[in-house]
Image (cartoon, helix red, strand yellow):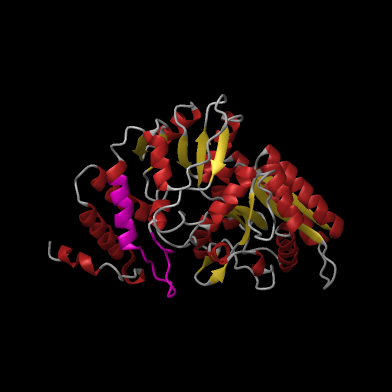
Amino acid sequence: MKQTYLLGLITLLLLALSACQTSADENTLSGTAILWYPAGVNEERAIGTILKQFADINPAVRIVAVPIEEDELAQRFRDTVEQGLGPDMVVGLNSYIGEWADTGLIRPVLTDTVNLTLFSDTVVHSAEYQNQLYGVPLALRPQALLINHPVETTPLPPPPSTLDALLQQTDAGELALLNANFWSAYWGIKSFGGNALLDADGRVTFSADAIRAWLGWLKQTQDNPNLIISRDDIALRNLFLEGDSTYYIADYEFLPDALSVLTDTLQIAALPVGTVSRSGSPLIMETLLFNAESSDTQIAITNALARFFVTAEPQAVLLRLTARVPANRLVRIDSRIYPAIAALQTQAQAATPYPNGLPFAEIEAIGNFMIANVLSDVSTVDEAVCQFGESVKFLLEAQFNQTGWQHCQWLEGS
């Protein structure tokens, strides 16, 4: 509580200073704005470098950059903004957008803030909520196939590019780990032809045929002694960090731990491709989000800063110093120099748009129940998928697109 109080007091003093110093001019920015970003040594170097470049162009602007531990950032932002304080701009995940927009913590992005052609359609849609853009895309956080071969392995075999190739590696004795939590495993649904979670009318749509195919693959392969399919992601991560497995399909948040422990042996590759299409999950990314209570002058400053952040040089700084995947699709990544970042960029291109506003935790619980029932022989694949569709339809009511679920009518009256 003391830390939150002191942070709020400091923010209040900075806002007061900002009010005294700001001036409005159509061609010249001046004043103070506050930026929060995830703490880290490399992050501080990168943000410092970018803000120095911004200051060279805007010498009358002062940006107060405050590093916040990432696991505390969301709650601190909520607490301070609700008190009428907080930063003018924050680097936050796009998964925050729905809740923060609903509670009035953030404002929509003004139409002239940034050139949206810098980003792919998937990236733009992943920062939207209720047909409005709420975040400026900064850096992408796709899943990846992590590979850990012993140091003495030479030459290194190529990464398994397909699900069949992955199984061939397990048949040869290599251990692979697969997280069976619904959203962590969603990439497999897309690999069998699953599409975006929102249709053209904004309704939620799950591809029943693709889910059945993916569940069938999981069911068929779960007895493979060299493929561990589990929802215990902590155990899977520990197995990989201890060097007991070769392959692990990981969420982006695990990458820093893997890179710090397996410095000399870790490879990063795109996810293995399925039988129908490239594998991918709803796209998580870091975005620039804007405090709804900022003054007009601070809005002008943060708009200019957001525009600058997504230009080529600042994006390259984030790449070089923090190993982030640029959201700006025009930034070229040389795979010979940055093979891991190039692989992550390739994977991000296969992602589906993140549908802000969905009850992700509730859908995950329903999806986990479906997967568990199939793998434990409680339900057949068809039964489990039908129950999943009915449960999601009940949860979302009119927002659910029922196309493809007519085969589940046998559940009625049961």
Vertical comparison of 54 with 160: above or below: below
| Quadrant (top left/top right/bottom left/bottom right) for the C terminus | bottom left
Residue drawn at the location 29% of the way across and 56% of the way down: 212
State the quadrant of the N terminus: top right
Q: Against 233, is 83 above or below? A: below
Q: Is residue 304 visible?
A: yes
Q: Quadrant of residue 340?
A: top right
* Relative to 297, 126 lies left or right: left
Q: Tell which residue pokes out farthest to the left in this image.
A: 414
Quarter occupied by residue 266: top right
Q: Residue furthest bottom?
A: 201
Q: Which residue occupies the foreground of this view, 218 or 369?
A: 218
| 88 or 38: nearer the viewer | 38
Q: How many marks?
A: 0
Q: Position of residue 117 (x, y in %)?
A: 65, 69
Front-most of residues 47 and 255: 255
Q: Vertical placement of 242 versus 395: above or below?
A: above
Residue 204 in the magenta stretch? The answer is yes
Q: Position of residue 84 (x, y in %)?
A: 62, 58
Q: Residue at x 45, y 53 (%)?
A: 279
Q: Position of residue 20 (x, y in %)?
A: 81, 60
Q: In the shown orientation, is residue 121 left or right of residue 396?
A: right
Task: Report the magenta residues as a range.
Answer: 193-219
Report the residue that reaches farthest toward the front.
155
Report if residue 106 lies within the magenta region: no
Residue at point 28% right, 49% down?
369
Image point (63%, 44%), residue name: 339
